[in-house]
Image: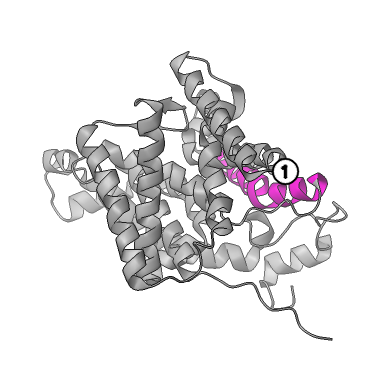
Amino acid sequence: MENKPAKPRYEYVDLMKGVCIILVVIQHLVGQCAVNPPWLTTFRMPLYFMLSGLFFSTYGSLRTFLIKKFNSLLVPFFFTWVLCWIHIRLHYEHPENFEILRYNVAIWFLIALFEVGLLFYFIYQLPKEWMKALVSLLISIGGYMMHQWDIHLPLYLDAAMSATVFYYIGPLIRRFHLLEPHSRRTTLLCAAVSILVFGTLAYLYPTSLLDLRLNRIFTPYPVFLLSAVSGTAAVFFLCKLIRRIPLVSYWGRYSIITLCSHIFIYKLLNEYGLLEALRQTFGIDAQLWAEWKLGPWIGVVSVFFLTLPLIWLLIRHIPFLCSQMPLLDPKSGKLYKSPRTLLRIFLKGKRADD
């Protein structure tokens, strides 16, 4: 029997994911500052949605699609939610004062991405490409207007609507074969044009700020769209030129683990006084520590290096809870592996035949 050719792996896609997750972690832990200006937010989450749509597939049926998305998005969401819930109950005297989606805000993205994927599943059924583009754009404009009218939908659905057009860009990139290798000169030219457009918009709108989680979009829709697309394109073409940066690409390949864990890790470092102990050990002045945001920046570095053993541990022992192995079989909807096999993986680690 002839083996099917393996799907090509585009190394620079992992690099893009790595760049994206680094921007996400810096934004969450450090916030706006001189080296992380607000206009960087205008493409950070749109880039993440585009990357998520890059390899979109309907998987043949809505049922299979929902099970696949449940495995890859909702299982990590609930796993992270439960861990945060347990920690809050054990660590705080008044756990009722904590809302988990505020305690670990990053996991909102998994809910919104599930909703965007489901919206696009139905958009993808449209017979003409221009129809898909138009409907994606109109839904995005609808999400934008939700902010203008101060309407907030439950479970981040308004944010999902605003992001639909960026998710659509992913399949569009595949349709026009932009993932495939092109001449270095062409790629460099595309990167330069994208940087020029994005830089011009950042200069004209230096205080531009985008918070997709709360669906807060503070620029006119054309500026919002063009900033996101040009910023995303700049990262895309630059990463295509560079192709791979070992650690960044590794974090990108397992970006969902870093996404779910980085705020939790940082809170643990703070709650148990490890960052403060570090400040005192090196005798850093408290005012200087606060003014230069040294704690958050050290937190960023700490988070990324602590995720290295965490990634290894999770993909080896509980891959079915962190999107590295399906929990439910897409065809039958039952457990992909028997409970006994899952327990063995948890206790002894994943083998090549699992």
Give the labeled residue for mark 1.
Answer: 127
User: What amino acid does circle 1 point to?
Assistant: Pro
Dominant SS of magenta comes to helix
> The magenta stretch spans which residues?
62-87
Task: Kindly tell me whether residue 267 is visible in this rendering.
Answer: no
* Above-or-below relation of 51 to 160: below
Q: Residue at x 40, y 49 (%)?
A: 232
The location of residue 219, given as percent across then percent down, is: 34, 26
Task: Kindly tell me whether residue 216 is visible in this rendering.
Answer: yes
The image quarter containing residue 183 is bottom left
Left or right side of 36 for 134:
right
Label 1 crowd (10 A; few <14 / some 14-19 / many >=20): few
Q: Residue at x 65, y 62 (%)?
A: 319
* Above-or-below relation of 239 to 267: below
The location of residue 315, given as percent across then percent down, is: 60, 65
The location of residue 153, given as percent across then percent down, is: 58, 21
